[in-house]
Amino acid sequence: MNVTFHTLTALATAAVLSSTKAGRPRRESSAPSPMPGLAVGFVAGILVHGLLDFVPHSYPIKSIPDVVLSLALFVAALAFAKPQYRLLIASCFLGSILPDLVDLAPAIMNKRLGCSLPVIKIFPWHWHQYSGSIYNGNRVWASVSYHVVVVSLSASLLYAYRKSLFGQGTDRIPSVDRIDS
């Protein structure tokens, strides 16, 4: 699966977590550490990556535009996110791209830069017998349908949880009784 789709699911995961106790930091002076929420986001990113890569799919976006688009989505999300959730977004994003960085980046660097890094695939969904990667052009409609579902579900979750992750919270909007005449 292209990294752009992994990034979309990472952002959707961060949006959902921003509305839960696991992802929401308290405002008290003795606030607990945000680490549990960050760890949940990181692990969720890895697991969702595995699920996306396991289902049969092709790669509709070429690698360089894919990386550029993915990074643009990530930076835009950071720019528009509430400050307290930027680390959560980064954690979900890192978890969602880590399997590709570990398993696929060495081979890409070897090919493009002439390096001789060892290539070891640690994550099972990158092993041939468990990978859903389709390179020969068959099952095109199944792959297109799958990508549409991923984009639609991610966009729906981002929309549903937009106020907790991106929008102005109720603490930033003055209420009628706080406005002086």
Image (cartoon, rainbow, N blue to C red):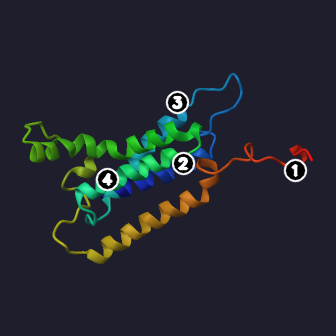
Separation of disc 2 and disc 4 at Cα?
A: 18 Å
Residue 10 in the figure: left or right of residue 84: left
Separation of disc 3 and disc 2 at Cα?
A: 22 Å
Residue 158 in the figure: left or right of residue 167: left
Q: Residue at x 43, y 68 (%)?
A: 149
Q: Are marks 4 and 3 in contact (CB under 8 Å)?
A: no
Residue 10 in the figure: left or right of residue 123: right
Dot 3 or dot 1, earlier in sequence: 3
Disc 3 secondary structure class: helix
Q: Nearer the viewer, mark 3 or mark 1?
A: 1
46 or 89: nearer the eye?
89
Q: Is residue 21 visible?
A: yes
Name the kind of residue labelled 4 in the image: Val
Residue underneath mark 3: 35
Name the kind of residue labelled 1 in the image: Val
Q: Position of residue 178 (x, y in %)?
A: 87, 43
24 or 72: nearer the eye?
72
Residue underneath mark 4: 68
Residue placed furthest toward the bottom: 141
Q: Position of residue 13 (x, y in %)?
A: 50, 50
